Image: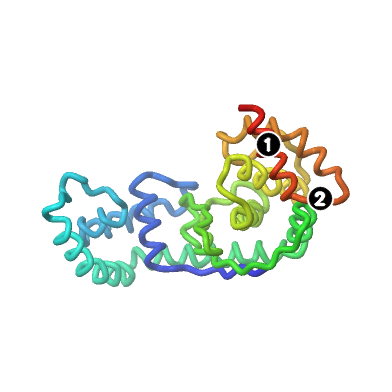
């Protein structure tokens, strides 16, 4: 298993602007720098800004002018991005993100040997994929599995080992489907059991998506039984969990 931590400047710009536009902050730290960058980018080109953050009015782009709009954006966007990258406002954001990348990388490497043993024991098979992790500003919310072994990550550290635990969460999305039952199982493995073993905590109360809490409570007795089994097989447990949902409905 290998994680490559990178910063894609174009993606960092888009994510930073979009989160600022929609007030999606995970921390007030360096918030002023983010908002300064947001104002600077908007001032450079409201058209490119609106295109990146998705705030342009649909009525302004009808069938008649759609082609000309796309052409103008294709002509203007590269210049806009290059100008933005050279600004002192973006350089602050990039420097803060670069520092955060090192933090994520260090936390992952420090805990890797211990956590992969825990996760592999919980699921019952070996893990050997290579992932690219696109790091964004730590004061804004980000945490997604894109498919094709690509992850985006950036968030304020809420508690000890938060980053390594949730990177494992995103990694496991590549081995499971996007059903609620699979998402609950991923959370039971990472948000709950891995957190429990790393930070010496107990659950419940649960971490993770609030919308999954009710389902997680239903799964918990079966999960506790699974944890006591000697020969763990997460694929078999997934099938049983899906049957449980089927019978419930």
Residue 205 in sight from this viewpoint: no
Residue 105 in sight from this viewpoint: yes
Camera-nearest label, 1 or 2: 1
In terms of sequence position, does the residue under pointer 1 or pointer 2 come before the other?
2
Residue 113 position in % (x across, y down): 76, 65
Residue at position x 49%, y 52% from top? 142
Q: Residue furthest left?
A: 64
Q: Nearer the viewer, residue 150 or 201?
A: 150
Residue 181 position in % (x across, y down): 63, 40
Residue 82 position in % (x across, y down): 29, 72
* Vertical relation: 86 (above or below) 16: below
Quadrant where the N terminus is found in the figure: bottom right
Q: Nearer the viewer, residue 222 or 245?
A: 245
Residue at position x 78%, y 55% from top? 124
- Asked whether, in this view, residue 153 is left or right of residue 227, the answer is left
- Asked whether, in this view, residue 27 is left or right of residue 4, the answer is left
Distance of mark 1 from mark 2, alpha carbons? 18 Å
The residue singled out by tag 2 in the image is 232
Q: Which mark is residue 243?
A: 1
Q: Give the SS element for disc 2.
A: loop
- Asked whether, in this view, residue 85 is left or right of residue 112, the answer is left
Q: Residues within 10 Å of mark 2 (few under 14, many from 20)?
A: some
Q: Nearer the viewer, residue 8 or 42?
A: 8
């Amino acid at each position: 298993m290998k994680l490559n931590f990178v910063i894609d400047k174009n993606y960092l710009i888009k994510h930073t602007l979009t989160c600022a536009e929609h007030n999606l902050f995970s921390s007030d730290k360096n918030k002023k720098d983010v908002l300064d960058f947001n104002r600077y980018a908007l001032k450079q080109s409201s058209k490119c800004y609106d295109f990146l953050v998705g705030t342009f009015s649909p009525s302004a782009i009808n069938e008649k002018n759609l082609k000309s709009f796309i052409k103008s954006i294709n002509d203007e966007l590269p210049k806009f991005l290059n100008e933005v990258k050279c600004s002192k406002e973006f350089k602050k954001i990039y420097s803060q993100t670069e520092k955060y990348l090192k933090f994520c990388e260090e936390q992952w490497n420090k805990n890797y040997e211990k956590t992969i043993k825990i996760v592999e024991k919980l699921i019952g098979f070996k893990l050997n994929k290579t992932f690219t992790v696109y790091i964004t500003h730590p004061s804004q919310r980000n945490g997604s599995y894109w498919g094709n072994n690509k992850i985006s990550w950036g968030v304020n550290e809420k508690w000890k080992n938060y980053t390594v635990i949730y990177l494992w969460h995103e990694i496991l999305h590549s081995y499971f489907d996007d059903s609620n039952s699979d998402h609950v199982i991923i959370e039971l493995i990472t948000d709950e059991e891995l957190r429990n073993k790393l930070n010496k905590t107990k659950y419940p109360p649960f971490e993770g998506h609030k919308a999954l809490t009710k389902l997680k409570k239903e799964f918990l007795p079966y999960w506790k039984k699974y944890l006591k089994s000697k020969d763990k097989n997460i694929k078999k447990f997934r099938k049983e969990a899906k049957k449980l949902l089927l019978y419930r409905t």
